Amino acid sequence: MTVGTKMLETIASCESTIANLHSFSLETQDQNAKTMFQNLANQQQQIIDNLKARYEYIQSQEPQYKQQ
């Protein structure tokens, strides 16, 4: 498994986490919990953005990690 593949799997996992956090936010009636889940989803999105930037850098620097 290449670094690129691992990065893509990690990004997909993070995106799944965001979906769960949004779901939790919609399912709760507690406004504090809703806000917390939304904040966590926003933080997770920032993590994804950073991972995607790193993945693009890896691809540009290390062509062997490109998905085929």
Image (spheres, rainbow, N blue to C red):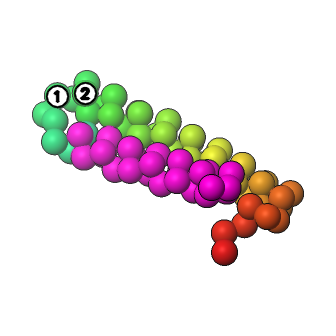
The answer to whether the residue labelled 1 contacts the one labelled 2, judged by CB atoms less than 8 Å apart, is yes
Label 1, on which residue? 30
For the magenta stretch, what is the residue range?
A: 1-24
Q: Identify which residue is drawn at 33% across, 28% down.
A: 36
Please say whether residue 3 is one of the residues in the magenta stretch.
yes
- Quick one: label 2, few (<14), some, or many (20+) residues within 10 Å? few
- Quick one: label 1, few (<14), some, or many (20+) residues within 10 Å? few
Residue 62 occupies which quadrant of the picture? Answer: bottom right
Residue furthest out toward the front: 1
Q: Identify which residue is drawn at 65% across, 44% down.
A: 50
**In this figure, what is the number of numbered marks?**
2
Q: CA distance from mark 1 to mark 2?
A: 5 Å
Label 2, on which residue? 33
Indicate the quadrant containing the C terminus: top left, top right, bottom left or bottom right.
bottom right
Q: Looking at the magenta stretch, what is its main secondary structure?
A: helix
Indicate the quadrant containing the N terminus: top left, top right, bottom left or bottom right.
bottom right
Q: Identify which residue is drawn at 61% across, 51% down.
A: 7
Q: Identify which residue is drawn at 72% across, 66% down.
A: 66
Q: Amino acid at mark 1?
A: Asp
Please say whether residue 53 is one of the residues in the magenta stretch.
no
Helix, strand, or loop for circle 2? helix
Q: Amino acid at mark 2?
A: Ala
Depth check, front residue: 48 or 36: 48
Depth check, front residue: 17 or 26: 17
- Residue 57 location in percent, x, y? 78, 54
Residue 52 visible (yes or no): no
Depth check, front residue: 62 or 53: 62
- Residue 17 location in percent, x, y? 38, 44
